[in-house]
Amino acid sequence: MIPSRPAVARLADSVASELEKRILEGSLKPGDRLPSERTLALDLGVSRPSLREAMQKLVSKGLLTTRHGGGTYVTDRLDAHFVDPWQDMLKGNPSMHRDLLEFRQMLESQAASLAADRATDADISRLDATYAALEDSYTRDDLDHCIDTDVAFHQAIAEASHNVLIGHLTASLMRVIHGHVAKNLEHLHARPQRWGQLRAQHQAIWQAIREHKPQEAALAASDHIDFVRQGIEDKARDEERRSSALRRLGDTVPPQDKA
């Protein structure tokens, strides 16, 4: 029996809601290409016409976008509207980095606390995998990989909090400060003792969450950001001393030798 148009519309609404939920929870991330229409229809247990109508609803809402050459993608609009202006402002106002770290400390300590309280077995398995990848990057002394796995580890914690806003804000924040994170890790990497402390902090956060200890997880995450803040201040002080020394060196060179 062919369903009536209202029944199809109601089914499309349900499918759209399911896809929207996957986008909000992070199962479908900004930039992800959706599976083929056939695969997605089978996954959701609906007809392809119902799926097409649902996808069109999300295109209209700006959550999905179609690209020339084929394919439907999760839009990055949720992140881009946050990321782009803040990246520009941070470049022009270095003093804002302190405010950003305060916000990050508040966000990540709460995320860790909630993750320790709410994480499912699947969340713990994912957290274990991201932590193992991070540990591997430490073992291999692979700085580039360490930067990527550091970001992935913190994002896994945010999503294990089961708070949609924390998940999306953390993803956006990490995009804003990715270059900032990279420079700080480079600074710490050149100092073996500090590098070892950073490694121990990630382990403390991981253990507290997987042992479901919210207060310990929040404290470990907060201590981690305090450590990051100190590293940034140390780096800025070192750079100022180096610049000052070079200026004094320049002042002692005879004028004929400066030419």
Image (spheres, rainbow, N blue to C red):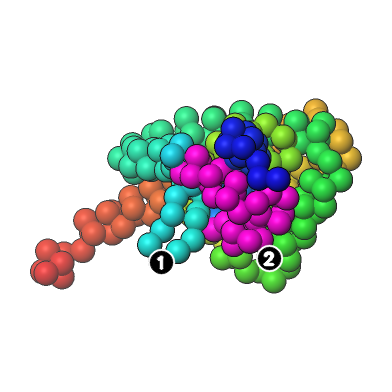
Query: Which residue is label 2 attached to?
Result: 137
Q: As displayed, is residue 118 above or below residue 29?
A: above
The residue lying furthest to the right in this view is: 211
Q: Nearer the viewer, residue 69 or 89?
A: 69
Q: Position of residue 45 (x, y in %)?
A: 73, 50
Magenta: main secondary structure:
helix
Query: Which residue is label 1 attached to?
Result: 69
Q: Is residue 12 magenta?
A: no
Image quarter of residue 160: top right
The mark lying in front, picked from 1 and 2, is 1
Which residue does the image show at 50% across and 54% down from the upper left? 73
Query: In this image, 250 relative to 191: left or right?
Result: left
Image quarter of residue 94: top left
Which residue does the image show at 54% across and 50% down from the upper left? 52
For the record, the magenta segment spans 33-59
Q: Amino acid at mark 2?
A: Ser
Q: Position of residue 175 (x, y in %)?
A: 49, 47
Which residue does the image show at 23% across and 59% down from the upper left? 250
Numbered label attached to residue 159:
none
Which of pointers 1 and 2 lies earlier in the amino acid sequence? Answer: 1
Disc 2 is placed on an element classified as helix
Q: As displayed, is residue 131 above or below residue 173?
A: below
The N terminus lies in which quarter of the figure?
A: top right
Q: Amino acid at mark 1?
A: Gly
Res. 181 visible in picture: no
Q: Nearer the viewer, residue 210 or 125?
A: 125
